[in-house]
Image: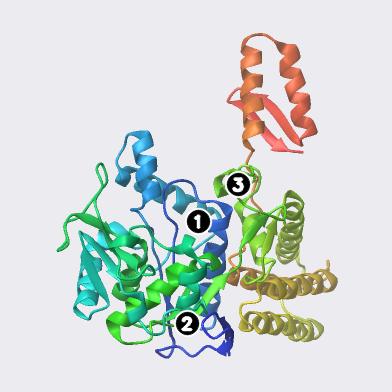
Amino acid sequence: MIRIYNTLSKKKEDFIPLEEGKVRMYVCGPTVYNFIHIGNARPMIVFDTVRRYMEHKGYEVNFVSNFTDVDDKIIKKANEEGVSAEEISRRYIEECKKDMEGMNIMPATTHPLATQEIDGMIDMISSLIEKGYAYAVNGTVYFRTRRFESYGKLSHKNLDDLQAGNRSLLVSGEDEKEDPLDFVLWKPKKEGEPYWVSPWGEGRPGWHIECSVMSRKYLGEQIDIHGGGEDLVFPHHENEIAQSEACSGKTFARYWMHNAFLNIDNRKMSKSLGNFFTVREISEKYDLQILRFFMLNAHYRSPLNFSAELMEASKNALERIQTAVDSLKYSAEHALAEDLTEAETELLKGAEKFETDFDASMDDDFNTADAIAAVFDLVKYANTHTGGDSSRAFARALCGRIQNLCDILGIITEKKEELLDAEVEGLIEERQAARKARDFARADEIRNLLLEKGIVLEDTREGVKWKRA
């Protein structure tokens, strides 16, 4: 039985799906105005792993994760570049998908775009107005927060405390609102911004209504799991609950899962501190499988600290698994005996313990850190019990078991040639230019510098070839 820590109840609960054998899961996706950063990567990796484990347990998972492709930040970027907001969002959706592929994140069952679901948003807002949960003022539509009696049940916040102590959380346009805590469902257009026609005038939806509508359309009025970063608990997910449940009269999501923050060198990531990294920047130095492995080495509800030292440690740890898999493949190819011996049959039975430990860890609120520990126990067991006299069947069986557990975590066990980082590529180009200019001293200097970095260059008729030393 899988147990999930539910933010709603603040405790672990047995997972019982709405429909036997099926999981309906919604995860808030990124706002696409630039390359995704490593903070965006954490929920992507976490909930992709949750999905993979659910599928491993035999569930059919309908996994929906949106792209917010209309937003103030997208419009700002479009205005800076002198292009349309659609061009910006389309560009960065494609870049995001490349990064997701690098992190071995499976495409969602559906990746809806906010701009393609505007009609559904207008319908839901109209329904909320009819039911008395929303009202229009001068082209803006607000949700009556106090009308929804259980508002605050997810974030465990009290409305009166919010009004008294959190003025910064209140949305602008207060003078138009019936209550300062009411939030926006639809806002009128501004000059130079994309807009849609609605019963309340030309404008665009508020951020919160998007996810309620997309979740309802692709998963139904009730879903099993809603996930995202802990920064979304309030107000985004709280507002989603209010909108969805006010509209349907039913419980919106049974289980709410939230991953903790990612810090950089024990400080919050921010551009002003100069410790802001995109996934693309990380990919210039590391295979993104290392980033995935690093993220899964901590429980998703624990704060995670990113540093160069921890990434190097993850790189070395992942290489241990990959080396073990390579070694087992070699043993399987070169084994003299084909079939299992009696002793090997018993050893394979003994190896089942590690798979049991793996499942027990993942059943306990997706404890990937302990699950990876079980993988390492299996790797150690395989290294200890295989050798030149092992049968082909034994080496293959152990190799298959390690690969299967890694696959559940989305970790690729095949070694990849590491990409050159931007600095090394630049040096190779500089060396080519120096050779053309007949500055052979500089060309030799660069060759020696690259050799120090473990890069061996070979000048051929086809051009410069390189390999790692």
Look at 77% across and 38% down and name the residue there.
469
For label 2, the residue is: 153
For label 1, the residue is: 100
Q: Quadrant of residue 354?
A: bottom right
Q: CA distance from mark 1 to mark 2?
A: 33 Å
- From the viewer's side, name the closer residue of 44 and 324: 44
- From the viewer's side, name the closer residue of 190 and 363: 190
Mark 2 residue element: loop
The image position of residue 27, as x and y in percent, is 45, 69
Q: CA distance from mark 3 to mark 2?
A: 33 Å
**Amino acid type shown at disc 1:** Met
Badge 1 vs badge 2, beta-carbon distance below 8 Å: no
How crowded is the residue under tag 2: few (<14 C-alpha within 10 Å), some, or many (20+)?
A: some
Image position of 250 with respect to 303: above or below: below
- From the viewer's side, name the closer residue of 373 and 457: 373
For label 3, the residue is: 276
Look at 64% across and 44% down and name the residue there.
273
Image position of 179 with respect to 319: above or below: below
Q: Is residue 99 visible?
A: yes
Badge 3 vs badge 1, beta-carbon distance below 8 Å: no
How many badges with numbers are in the image? Answer: 3
**Amino acid type shown at disc 2:** Lys
**Amino acid type shown at disc 3:** Phe
Mark 3 residue element: loop
Identify the mark nearer the N-term, 1 or 2: 1
